[in-house]
Image: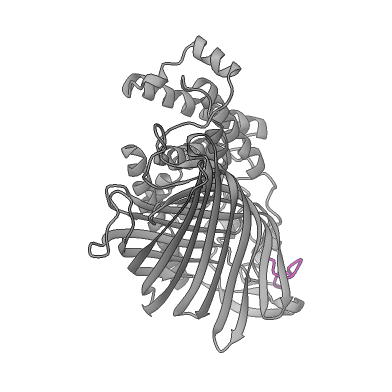
Protein backbone atom coordinates (compact mmCIF):
# COMPACT_ATOMS: atom_id res chain seq x y z
CA UNK A 1 0.00 0.00 0.00
CA UNK A 2 2.81 2.39 0.86
CA UNK A 3 4.51 1.67 -2.48
CA UNK A 4 1.28 2.54 -4.33
CA UNK A 5 1.20 5.90 -2.59
CA UNK A 6 4.86 6.59 -3.38
CA UNK A 7 4.21 5.73 -7.02
CA UNK A 8 1.23 8.10 -7.01
CA UNK A 9 3.32 10.91 -5.54
CA UNK A 10 6.22 10.41 -7.98
CA UNK A 11 3.87 10.19 -10.96
CA UNK A 12 2.05 13.34 -9.87
CA UNK A 13 5.31 15.27 -9.50
CA UNK A 14 6.26 14.33 -13.06
CA UNK A 15 2.77 15.01 -14.38
CA UNK A 16 2.58 18.37 -12.62
CA UNK A 17 5.85 19.48 -14.19
CA UNK A 18 4.91 18.19 -17.64
CA UNK A 19 2.64 20.96 -19.01
CA UNK A 20 4.99 23.65 -17.73
CA UNK A 21 7.90 21.99 -19.57
CA UNK A 22 5.92 21.96 -22.82
CA UNK A 23 4.86 25.57 -22.31
CA UNK A 24 8.34 26.81 -21.42
CA UNK A 25 10.01 25.06 -24.34
CA UNK A 26 7.43 26.31 -26.79
CA UNK A 27 7.74 29.89 -25.57
CA UNK A 28 11.54 29.73 -25.85
CA UNK A 29 11.38 28.41 -29.39
CA UNK A 30 8.98 31.12 -30.49
CA UNK A 31 11.50 33.80 -29.60
CA UNK A 32 14.01 32.46 -32.12
CA UNK A 33 11.63 31.17 -34.76
CA UNK A 34 11.53 32.78 -38.18
CA UNK A 35 8.29 34.29 -39.51
CA UNK A 36 6.55 32.12 -42.08
CA UNK A 37 3.38 32.43 -44.09
CA UNK A 38 0.53 30.01 -43.66
CA UNK A 39 -3.15 29.82 -44.40
CA UNK A 40 -5.55 30.31 -41.50
CA UNK A 41 -9.06 28.95 -41.86
CA UNK A 42 -11.76 30.40 -39.62
CA UNK A 43 -15.39 29.56 -39.21
CA UNK A 44 -17.67 29.85 -42.18
CA UNK A 45 -14.87 28.66 -44.52
CA UNK A 46 -13.37 32.14 -44.68
CA UNK A 47 -9.77 31.77 -45.87
CA UNK A 48 -7.22 34.32 -44.79
CA UNK A 49 -3.45 34.55 -45.13
CA UNK A 50 -1.47 35.83 -42.19
CA UNK A 51 2.18 36.22 -41.22
CA UNK A 52 2.78 34.10 -38.17
CA UNK A 53 5.71 32.67 -36.25
CA UNK A 54 5.83 28.91 -36.84
CA UNK A 55 8.11 26.57 -34.94
CA UNK A 56 9.27 23.88 -37.36
CA UNK A 57 11.99 21.40 -36.29
CA UNK A 58 15.01 21.13 -38.55
CA UNK A 59 14.09 17.59 -39.60
CA UNK A 60 10.58 18.70 -40.50
CA UNK A 61 12.00 21.58 -42.54
CA UNK A 62 13.99 19.06 -44.56
CA UNK A 63 10.72 17.35 -45.47
CA UNK A 64 8.71 20.51 -46.02
CA UNK A 65 7.95 22.11 -49.36
CA UNK A 66 9.04 25.70 -50.19
CA UNK A 67 5.50 26.87 -49.49
CA UNK A 68 5.83 25.81 -45.87
CA UNK A 69 9.13 27.66 -45.48
CA UNK A 70 7.84 30.94 -46.74
CA UNK A 71 8.37 30.57 -50.49
CA UNK A 72 5.71 30.00 -53.13
CA UNK A 73 1.97 29.85 -52.65
CA UNK A 74 0.70 28.94 -49.20
CA UNK A 75 -0.78 25.45 -48.84
CA UNK A 76 -4.55 25.24 -49.10
CA UNK A 77 -6.31 23.32 -46.33
CA UNK A 78 -8.62 20.57 -47.36
CA UNK A 79 -11.36 21.50 -44.88
CA UNK A 80 -12.25 24.19 -42.41
CA UNK A 81 -10.19 23.99 -39.26
CA UNK A 82 -7.51 21.67 -40.65
CA UNK A 83 -3.85 22.33 -40.04
CA UNK A 84 -1.87 23.73 -43.03
CA UNK A 85 1.19 21.72 -41.96
CA UNK A 86 -0.94 18.57 -41.71
CA UNK A 87 -2.55 19.27 -45.10
CA UNK A 88 0.83 19.75 -46.82
CA UNK A 89 2.55 16.69 -45.40
CA UNK A 90 -0.53 14.50 -45.74
CA UNK A 91 -2.56 12.58 -43.16
CA UNK A 92 -0.93 10.53 -40.45
CA UNK A 93 -0.99 6.77 -40.93
CA UNK A 94 -3.98 5.27 -39.09
CA UNK A 95 -1.90 2.96 -36.89
CA UNK A 96 1.20 5.03 -36.19
CA UNK A 97 3.09 6.14 -33.13
CA UNK A 98 2.35 9.53 -31.59
CA UNK A 99 4.96 11.17 -33.80
CA UNK A 100 3.45 9.98 -37.08
CA UNK A 101 5.76 9.65 -40.10
CA UNK A 102 9.40 8.94 -39.13
CA UNK A 103 12.23 11.35 -39.86
CA UNK A 104 14.86 10.15 -42.34
CA UNK A 105 17.29 8.04 -40.32
CA UNK A 106 14.98 8.19 -37.29
CA UNK A 107 12.53 5.42 -36.46
CA UNK A 108 13.62 2.08 -37.84
CA UNK A 109 11.41 0.32 -40.37
CA UNK A 110 9.76 -2.37 -38.25
CA UNK A 111 6.75 -4.11 -39.75
CA UNK A 112 3.41 -4.13 -37.96
CA UNK A 113 3.90 -7.81 -37.17
CA UNK A 114 7.34 -7.11 -35.68
CA UNK A 115 5.99 -4.25 -33.56
CA UNK A 116 3.20 -6.51 -32.31
CA UNK A 117 5.79 -9.11 -31.37
CA UNK A 118 7.89 -6.55 -29.48
CA UNK A 119 4.88 -5.25 -27.55
CA UNK A 120 3.75 -8.79 -26.68
CA UNK A 121 7.22 -9.75 -25.47
CA UNK A 122 7.40 -6.63 -23.31
CA UNK A 123 3.96 -7.23 -21.80
CA UNK A 124 4.92 -10.81 -20.89
CA UNK A 125 8.24 -9.62 -19.47
CA UNK A 126 6.38 -7.12 -17.26
CA UNK A 127 4.02 -9.88 -16.09
CA UNK A 128 6.73 -12.37 -15.12
CA UNK A 129 8.94 -9.69 -13.58
CA UNK A 130 6.12 -8.68 -11.24
CA UNK A 131 5.40 -12.32 -10.41
CA UNK A 132 9.06 -12.91 -9.61
CA UNK A 133 9.32 -9.78 -7.48
CA UNK A 134 6.23 -10.65 -5.42
CA UNK A 135 7.43 -14.20 -4.85
CA UNK A 136 11.18 -13.94 -4.34
CA UNK A 137 11.55 -10.40 -2.99
CA UNK A 138 8.20 -9.62 -1.40
CA UNK A 139 7.59 -13.29 -0.45
CA UNK A 140 3.85 -12.68 -0.60
CA UNK A 141 1.82 -15.73 0.33
CA UNK A 142 -0.53 -15.29 -2.63
CA UNK A 143 2.38 -15.18 -5.10
CA UNK A 144 3.31 -18.88 -4.81
CA UNK A 145 1.54 -19.86 -8.01
CA UNK A 146 1.44 -23.53 -8.99
CA UNK A 147 -0.24 -25.79 -11.49
CA UNK A 148 -2.89 -26.59 -8.90
CA UNK A 149 -3.72 -22.90 -8.28
CA UNK A 150 -3.89 -22.25 -12.01
CA UNK A 151 -6.25 -25.18 -12.58
CA UNK A 152 -8.44 -24.10 -9.66
CA UNK A 153 -8.66 -20.52 -10.96
CA UNK A 154 -9.60 -21.71 -14.42
CA UNK A 155 -12.49 -23.70 -12.94
CA UNK A 156 -13.62 -21.27 -10.22
CA UNK A 157 -16.12 -18.44 -10.29
CA UNK A 158 -14.89 -14.85 -10.38
CA UNK A 159 -15.30 -12.85 -7.16
CA UNK A 160 -15.01 -9.34 -5.69
CA UNK A 161 -11.74 -9.23 -3.78
CA UNK A 162 -10.86 -7.61 -0.44
CA UNK A 163 -7.68 -5.72 -1.40
CA UNK A 164 -6.97 -2.30 0.05
CA UNK A 165 -8.70 0.63 -1.67
CA UNK A 166 -5.41 2.10 -2.89
CA UNK A 167 -4.23 -1.22 -4.26
CA UNK A 168 -7.45 -1.97 -6.14
CA UNK A 169 -8.29 1.51 -7.35
CA UNK A 170 -4.88 3.03 -8.08
CA UNK A 171 -2.24 0.30 -7.99
CA UNK A 172 -4.05 -1.96 -10.44
CA UNK A 173 -4.92 0.83 -12.91
CA UNK A 174 -1.27 1.93 -12.87
CA UNK A 175 -0.28 -1.68 -13.49
CA UNK A 176 -2.58 -1.64 -16.52
CA UNK A 177 -0.75 1.34 -18.01
CA UNK A 178 2.43 -0.69 -18.48
CA UNK A 179 1.15 -3.26 -20.96
CA UNK A 180 -0.93 -0.59 -22.70
CA UNK A 181 2.07 1.74 -23.06
CA UNK A 182 4.20 -1.15 -24.29
CA UNK A 183 1.82 -1.56 -27.23
CA UNK A 184 1.14 2.13 -27.86
CA UNK A 185 4.78 3.17 -27.82
CA UNK A 186 5.69 0.22 -30.06
CA UNK A 187 3.67 1.86 -32.82
CA UNK A 188 0.33 0.10 -32.44
CA UNK A 189 -2.89 2.07 -32.73
CA UNK A 190 -5.24 2.92 -29.88
CA UNK A 191 -7.74 0.15 -30.48
CA UNK A 192 -5.09 -2.54 -31.00
CA UNK A 193 -3.32 -1.41 -27.82
CA UNK A 194 -6.48 -1.78 -25.71
CA UNK A 195 -6.27 -5.57 -26.11
CA UNK A 196 -3.00 -5.67 -24.16
CA UNK A 197 -4.19 -4.59 -20.68
CA UNK A 198 -7.34 -6.70 -21.11
CA UNK A 199 -5.28 -9.81 -21.86
CA UNK A 200 -2.60 -8.95 -19.27
CA UNK A 201 -5.21 -8.52 -16.54
CA UNK A 202 -6.87 -11.85 -17.37
CA UNK A 203 -3.49 -13.59 -17.35
CA UNK A 204 -2.71 -12.09 -13.95
CA UNK A 205 -6.06 -13.02 -12.41
CA UNK A 206 -5.77 -16.62 -13.55
CA UNK A 207 -2.03 -17.25 -13.22
CA UNK A 208 -0.42 -14.33 -11.42
CA UNK A 209 -1.64 -15.09 -7.90
CA UNK A 210 -3.17 -17.95 -5.96
CA UNK A 211 -6.32 -16.09 -4.89
CA UNK A 212 -9.56 -16.48 -6.82
CA UNK A 213 -9.81 -14.33 -9.98
CA UNK A 214 -11.36 -10.91 -9.31
CA UNK A 215 -14.03 -9.51 -11.59
CA UNK A 216 -13.43 -6.02 -10.22
CA UNK A 217 -9.75 -6.16 -11.23
CA UNK A 218 -10.62 -7.48 -14.69
CA UNK A 219 -12.75 -4.37 -15.28
CA UNK A 220 -10.79 -1.68 -13.43
CA UNK A 221 -7.25 -2.65 -14.45
CA UNK A 222 -7.73 -2.48 -18.25
CA UNK A 223 -10.31 0.34 -18.43
CA UNK A 224 -8.51 2.68 -16.02
CA UNK A 225 -5.15 1.53 -17.39
CA UNK A 226 -6.17 2.54 -20.92
CA UNK A 227 -7.43 5.96 -19.80
CA UNK A 228 -4.44 6.74 -17.58
CA UNK A 229 -1.96 5.13 -19.97
CA UNK A 230 -3.11 7.06 -23.05
CA UNK A 231 -3.04 10.41 -21.23
CA UNK A 232 0.41 9.81 -19.74
CA UNK A 233 1.79 8.53 -23.04
CA UNK A 234 0.58 11.55 -25.00
CA UNK A 235 1.94 14.04 -22.48
CA UNK A 236 5.24 12.14 -22.24
CA UNK A 237 5.75 12.12 -26.00
CA UNK A 238 4.94 15.83 -26.23
CA UNK A 239 7.55 16.61 -23.56
CA UNK A 240 10.15 14.36 -25.16
CA UNK A 241 9.66 16.14 -28.49
CA UNK A 242 10.97 19.35 -26.87
CA UNK A 243 14.39 17.74 -26.43
CA UNK A 244 16.81 18.00 -23.52
CA UNK A 245 17.85 15.73 -20.67
CA UNK A 246 15.37 17.09 -18.12
CA UNK A 247 12.47 16.63 -20.53
CA UNK A 248 13.64 13.09 -21.28
CA UNK A 249 13.72 12.24 -17.55
CA UNK A 250 10.23 13.65 -16.93
CA UNK A 251 8.84 11.85 -19.99
CA UNK A 252 10.45 8.62 -18.83
CA UNK A 253 8.82 8.93 -15.40
CA UNK A 254 5.41 9.44 -16.97
CA UNK A 255 5.69 6.59 -19.48
CA UNK A 256 8.72 4.31 -18.93
CA UNK A 257 7.76 1.94 -21.74
CA UNK A 258 7.71 4.84 -24.17
CA UNK A 259 11.30 5.67 -23.20
CA UNK A 260 12.34 2.03 -23.70
CA UNK A 261 10.67 1.64 -27.08
CA UNK A 262 12.11 4.94 -28.24
CA UNK A 263 15.52 3.33 -27.87
CA UNK A 264 14.47 0.08 -29.52
CA UNK A 265 12.39 1.43 -32.38
CA UNK A 266 13.71 4.97 -32.79
CA UNK A 267 11.83 8.23 -32.61
CA UNK A 268 9.24 9.57 -35.02
CA UNK A 269 8.42 13.11 -36.09
CA UNK A 270 6.48 14.94 -33.37
CA UNK A 271 2.84 15.61 -34.05
CA UNK A 272 1.79 19.23 -33.41
CA UNK A 273 0.49 19.65 -29.87
CA UNK A 274 -3.17 20.72 -29.90
CA UNK A 275 -4.40 23.76 -28.03
CA UNK A 276 -4.00 23.09 -24.32
CA UNK A 277 -4.66 24.77 -21.00
CA UNK A 278 -2.97 23.87 -17.73
CA UNK A 279 -2.47 24.98 -14.14
CA UNK A 280 0.26 23.62 -11.88
CA UNK A 281 -0.89 24.17 -8.29
CA UNK A 282 1.02 24.37 -5.00
CA UNK A 283 -0.83 25.25 -1.81
CA UNK A 284 -2.78 23.86 1.12
CA UNK A 285 -5.88 21.73 1.67
CA UNK A 286 -8.13 21.42 4.71
CA UNK A 287 -11.52 19.95 5.52
CA UNK A 288 -13.70 18.16 8.00
CA UNK A 289 -15.03 14.64 8.21
CA UNK A 290 -14.74 11.38 10.10
CA UNK A 291 -12.01 9.81 7.96
CA UNK A 292 -8.89 8.63 9.74
CA UNK A 293 -6.04 11.09 9.22
CA UNK A 294 -8.31 13.74 7.74
CA UNK A 295 -7.04 17.25 8.55
CA UNK A 296 -9.40 19.55 10.40
CA UNK A 297 -9.91 23.16 9.33
CA UNK A 298 -7.27 24.39 11.76
CA UNK A 299 -4.53 22.20 10.31
CA UNK A 300 -4.23 22.52 6.52
CA UNK A 301 -1.85 20.15 4.76
CA UNK A 302 0.46 20.78 1.79
CA UNK A 303 -1.14 20.02 -1.57
CA UNK A 304 0.31 19.63 -5.07
CA UNK A 305 -2.03 19.53 -8.04
CA UNK A 306 -2.30 19.83 -11.80
CA UNK A 307 -5.17 20.48 -14.20
CA UNK A 308 -4.79 19.94 -17.93
CA UNK A 309 -7.17 20.19 -20.88
CA UNK A 310 -5.68 18.65 -24.02
CA UNK A 311 -7.47 19.82 -27.17
CA UNK A 312 -9.65 22.77 -26.20
CA UNK A 313 -13.34 22.42 -27.16
CA UNK A 314 -14.37 25.31 -29.38
CA UNK A 315 -10.95 25.65 -31.01
CA UNK A 316 -11.64 25.71 -34.78
CA UNK A 317 -8.23 24.12 -35.45
CA UNK A 318 -8.85 21.12 -33.19
CA UNK A 319 -8.85 17.86 -35.14
CA UNK A 320 -10.53 14.78 -33.71
CA UNK A 321 -8.74 12.10 -35.69
CA UNK A 322 -8.08 9.57 -32.91
CA UNK A 323 -9.43 8.65 -29.47
CA UNK A 324 -8.24 11.06 -26.77
CA UNK A 325 -7.44 13.90 -29.15
CA UNK A 326 -9.40 15.70 -26.44
CA UNK A 327 -9.08 14.81 -22.78
CA UNK A 328 -9.34 16.52 -19.40
CA UNK A 329 -7.07 15.58 -16.50
CA UNK A 330 -7.06 16.63 -12.86
CA UNK A 331 -4.47 15.29 -10.43
CA UNK A 332 -3.58 16.16 -6.85
CA UNK A 333 -1.85 14.87 -3.73
CA UNK A 334 -2.01 16.00 -0.12
CA UNK A 335 0.44 14.63 2.43
CA UNK A 336 -1.46 13.08 5.36
CA UNK A 337 -1.44 9.61 6.92
CA UNK A 338 -4.25 8.50 4.57
CA UNK A 339 -3.24 10.53 1.49
CA UNK A 340 -5.63 13.07 0.00
CA UNK A 341 -5.30 12.21 -3.66
CA UNK A 342 -7.29 12.80 -6.83
CA UNK A 343 -6.83 11.52 -10.38
CA UNK A 344 -9.69 12.25 -12.77
CA UNK A 345 -9.28 11.71 -16.50
CA UNK A 346 -12.02 11.93 -19.10
CA UNK A 347 -11.16 11.33 -22.76
CA UNK A 348 -13.23 11.57 -25.94
CA UNK A 349 -13.34 8.04 -27.32
CA UNK A 350 -15.47 8.66 -30.42
CA UNK A 351 -16.97 12.02 -31.29
CA UNK A 352 -17.21 15.02 -33.53
CA UNK A 353 -16.93 18.79 -33.48
CA UNK A 354 -20.02 21.01 -33.43
CA UNK A 355 -20.14 24.64 -34.54
CA UNK A 356 -23.77 25.80 -34.41
CA UNK A 357 -22.86 29.49 -34.65
CA UNK A 358 -19.95 31.78 -35.47
CA UNK A 359 -19.26 32.39 -31.77
CA UNK A 360 -20.14 28.93 -30.44
CA UNK A 361 -18.16 25.73 -30.86
CA UNK A 362 -17.44 22.49 -29.12
CA UNK A 363 -17.53 18.73 -29.36
CA UNK A 364 -19.68 15.81 -28.33
CA UNK A 365 -19.42 12.04 -28.26
CA UNK A 366 -18.60 8.97 -26.21
CA UNK A 367 -16.25 9.46 -23.25
CA UNK A 368 -14.16 6.92 -21.35
CA UNK A 369 -13.20 7.98 -17.82
CA UNK A 370 -11.28 7.01 -14.72
CA UNK A 371 -11.98 8.79 -11.41
CA UNK A 372 -10.03 8.30 -8.20
CA UNK A 373 -10.74 10.72 -5.34
CA UNK A 374 -9.88 10.54 -1.65
CA UNK A 375 -9.68 14.30 -1.03
CA UNK A 376 -13.11 14.47 0.56
CA UNK A 377 -14.43 12.77 3.69
CA UNK A 378 -15.53 9.85 1.49
CA UNK A 379 -13.53 7.85 -1.03
CA UNK A 380 -14.74 7.09 -4.55
CA UNK A 381 -13.22 5.56 -7.67
CA UNK A 382 -14.92 4.59 -10.93
CA UNK A 383 -14.25 3.31 -14.43
CA UNK A 384 -17.06 4.57 -16.64
CA UNK A 385 -18.33 5.00 -20.19
CA UNK A 386 -20.73 7.81 -21.07
CA UNK A 387 -22.10 10.37 -23.49
CA UNK A 388 -21.52 14.08 -23.19
CA UNK A 389 -20.56 17.39 -24.74
CA UNK A 390 -18.19 20.26 -24.08
CA UNK A 391 -18.12 23.70 -25.67
CA UNK A 392 -17.35 27.39 -25.54
CA UNK A 393 -19.50 30.43 -26.36
CA UNK A 394 -17.92 33.85 -26.97
CA UNK A 395 -19.98 36.47 -25.13
CA UNK A 396 -18.07 39.52 -26.32
CA UNK A 397 -15.89 41.93 -24.44
CA UNK A 398 -13.32 39.22 -23.75
CA UNK A 399 -15.86 37.06 -21.90
CA UNK A 400 -16.54 33.42 -22.71
CA UNK A 401 -18.75 30.73 -21.20
CA UNK A 402 -17.39 27.17 -21.12
CA UNK A 403 -19.60 24.20 -20.26
CA UNK A 404 -19.10 20.44 -20.01
CA UNK A 405 -21.74 17.83 -19.26
CA UNK A 406 -21.25 14.04 -19.27
CA UNK A 407 -23.55 11.24 -18.04
CA UNK A 408 -21.93 7.81 -17.71
CA UNK A 409 -22.57 4.21 -16.79
CA UNK A 410 -20.12 3.04 -14.13
CA UNK A 411 -18.66 -0.26 -15.32
CA UNK A 412 -17.06 -0.84 -11.92
CA UNK A 413 -17.02 1.56 -8.99
CA UNK A 414 -15.80 1.62 -5.40
CA UNK A 415 -17.08 3.92 -2.65
CA UNK A 416 -16.97 4.11 1.11
CA UNK A 417 -15.47 5.60 4.24
CA UNK A 418 -13.75 4.05 7.23
CA UNK A 419 -16.46 1.96 8.98
CA UNK A 420 -15.92 -1.70 8.10
CA UNK A 421 -18.51 -4.25 6.99
CA UNK A 422 -17.31 -6.94 9.39
CA UNK A 423 -14.18 -8.54 7.90
CA UNK A 424 -12.61 -7.61 4.60
CA UNK A 425 -12.65 -4.38 2.68
CA UNK A 426 -14.00 -1.06 3.95
CA UNK A 427 -15.76 0.09 0.76
CA UNK A 428 -18.42 -1.04 -1.70
CA UNK A 429 -17.89 -2.52 -5.15
CA UNK A 430 -20.34 -2.53 -8.01
CA UNK A 431 -21.77 -0.89 -11.11
CA UNK A 432 -23.77 2.32 -11.11
CA UNK A 433 -23.96 5.71 -12.79
CA UNK A 434 -22.23 9.06 -12.56
CA UNK A 435 -22.63 12.56 -13.98
CA UNK A 436 -20.60 15.75 -14.14
CA UNK A 437 -21.66 19.29 -15.00
CA UNK A 438 -19.06 22.07 -15.13
CA UNK A 439 -19.83 25.71 -15.96
CA UNK A 440 -17.10 28.35 -16.09
CA UNK A 441 -16.96 32.01 -17.02
CA UNK A 442 -13.65 33.25 -18.40
CA UNK A 443 -12.43 36.80 -18.80
CA UNK A 444 -9.47 35.94 -21.02
CA UNK A 445 -6.67 35.79 -20.39
CA UNK A 446 -6.50 36.45 -16.67
CA UNK A 447 -9.63 35.51 -14.76
CA UNK A 448 -11.80 32.41 -14.65
CA UNK A 449 -14.32 31.10 -12.19
CA UNK A 450 -17.13 28.61 -12.07
CA UNK A 451 -19.13 25.90 -10.39
CA UNK A 452 -19.20 22.15 -10.81
CA UNK A 453 -21.51 19.31 -9.81
CA UNK A 454 -20.39 15.68 -9.59
CA UNK A 455 -22.67 12.78 -8.69
CA UNK A 456 -21.84 9.09 -8.17
CA UNK A 457 -24.08 6.09 -7.50
CA UNK A 458 -22.52 2.70 -6.70
CA UNK A 459 -24.70 -0.38 -6.18
CA UNK A 460 -22.67 -2.61 -3.85
CA UNK A 461 -22.62 -6.37 -3.60
CA UNK A 462 -21.30 -8.90 -1.09
CA UNK A 463 -20.26 -7.60 2.37
CA UNK A 464 -20.76 -4.03 1.17
CA UNK A 465 -24.23 -4.55 -0.32
CA UNK A 466 -26.36 -1.43 -0.60
CA UNK A 467 -26.75 1.77 -2.60
CA UNK A 468 -24.16 4.52 -2.08
CA UNK A 469 -24.75 8.03 -3.46
CA UNK A 470 -22.16 10.81 -3.32
CA UNK A 471 -22.77 14.36 -4.56
CA UNK A 472 -20.03 16.98 -4.68
CA UNK A 473 -20.73 20.65 -5.37
CA UNK A 474 -17.78 22.99 -5.79
CA UNK A 475 -16.96 26.59 -6.69
CA UNK A 476 -13.60 28.15 -7.45
CA UNK A 477 -11.62 30.82 -9.25
CA UNK A 478 -8.20 31.39 -10.80
CA UNK A 479 -6.63 34.84 -11.13
CA UNK A 480 -3.47 35.33 -13.19
CA UNK A 481 -1.46 38.18 -11.67
CA UNK A 482 1.75 38.54 -13.67
CA UNK A 483 2.49 36.41 -16.71
CA UNK A 484 1.78 32.74 -15.88
CA UNK A 485 1.74 33.37 -12.12
CA UNK A 486 -1.72 33.00 -10.58
CA UNK A 487 -3.59 32.40 -7.36
CA UNK A 488 -6.69 30.32 -6.90
CA UNK A 489 -9.09 28.76 -4.44
CA UNK A 490 -11.80 26.10 -4.42
CA UNK A 491 -14.47 25.12 -1.92
CA UNK A 492 -16.26 21.77 -2.21
CA UNK A 493 -19.14 20.33 -0.22
CA UNK A 494 -19.92 16.60 -0.15
CA UNK A 495 -23.30 14.98 0.53
CA UNK A 496 -23.64 11.22 0.99
CA UNK A 497 -26.68 8.95 1.19
CA UNK A 498 -26.16 5.28 1.98
CA UNK A 499 -28.79 2.56 2.20
CA UNK A 500 -27.10 -0.54 3.59
CA UNK A 501 -28.12 -4.19 3.38
CA UNK A 502 -30.49 -3.78 6.34
CA UNK A 503 -32.39 -1.02 4.53
CA UNK A 504 -31.36 1.68 6.99
CA UNK A 505 -30.60 5.11 5.51
CA UNK A 506 -27.36 6.79 6.60
CA UNK A 507 -26.43 10.34 5.63
CA UNK A 508 -23.31 12.45 6.04
CA UNK A 509 -21.53 15.49 4.69
CA UNK A 510 -18.20 17.30 4.77
CA UNK A 511 -16.28 20.22 3.28
CA UNK A 512 -12.94 20.63 1.54
CA UNK A 513 -11.08 23.92 0.98
CA UNK A 514 -8.04 24.43 -1.25
CA UNK A 515 -5.99 27.63 -1.60
CA UNK A 516 -3.01 27.64 -3.92
CA UNK A 517 -0.45 29.40 -6.06
CA UNK A 518 -0.52 28.29 -9.69
CA UNK A 519 1.67 28.38 -12.76
CA UNK A 520 -0.93 28.66 -15.51
CA UNK A 521 -0.79 28.68 -19.27
CA UNK A 522 -2.81 28.08 -22.42
Instruction: Using the image as rendered, state which of residue 12 and residue 60 is in the foreground.
Output: 12
Q: Is residue 508 left or right of residue 275?
A: left
Does residue 371 sit above or below 389 in this rendering? above
- Furthest-top residue in this view: 148
Taking the spot 45% from the left edge, 16% from the top edge, the residue there is 145
Instruction: Tell me residue 290's x, y (percent).
Output: 33, 53
Q: Note whether residue 241 is visible.
A: no
Taking the spot 26% from the left edge, 62% from the top edge, the residue there is 300
Q: Is residue 246 left or right of residue 366?
A: left
Instruction: Using the image as rendered, state which of residue 173 and residue 251 is in the foreground.
Output: 173
Magenta stretch: helix, strand or loop mostly:
loop
Q: Which residues are magenta?
A: 73-82
State which quadrant residue 119 falls in. Answer: top right
Does residue 327 sit above or below 399 in this rendering? above
Q: Name the quadrant of the N terminus.
A: top left
Number of marks in picture: 0
State which quadrant residue 130 falls in. Answer: top left
Taking the spot 56% from the left edge, 89% from the top edge, the residue there is 397
Taking the spot 50% from the left edge, 72% from the top edge, the residue there is 451
Instruction: Tell me residue 186's x, y (percent).
Output: 57, 38
Q: Is residue 133 left or right of residue 195?
A: left
Q: Note whether residue 490 is visible.
A: yes
Q: Can residue 440 be found in the magenta stretch?
A: no
Instruction: Using the image as rendered, state which of residue 283 and residue 57 is in the foreground.
Output: 283
Instruction: Tell me residue 142's x, y (percent).
Output: 41, 21
Amino acid sequence: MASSRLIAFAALLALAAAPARIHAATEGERESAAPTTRTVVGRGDVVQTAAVTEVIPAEARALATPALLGGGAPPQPTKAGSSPLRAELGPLPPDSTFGGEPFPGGARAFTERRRLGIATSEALAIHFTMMGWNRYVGNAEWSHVSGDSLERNLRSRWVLDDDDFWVNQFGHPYQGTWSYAAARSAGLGFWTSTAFPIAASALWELGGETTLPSVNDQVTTPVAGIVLGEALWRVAEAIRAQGGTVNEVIAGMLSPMSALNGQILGRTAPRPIPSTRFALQLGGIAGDGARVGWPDTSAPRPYLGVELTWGLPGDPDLELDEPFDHFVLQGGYGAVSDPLAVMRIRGLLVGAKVEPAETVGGLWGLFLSFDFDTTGPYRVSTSALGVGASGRAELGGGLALETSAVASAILMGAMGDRPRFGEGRDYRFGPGEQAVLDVRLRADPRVSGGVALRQYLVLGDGPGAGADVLVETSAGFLLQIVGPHAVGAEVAHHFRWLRDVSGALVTGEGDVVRVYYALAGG
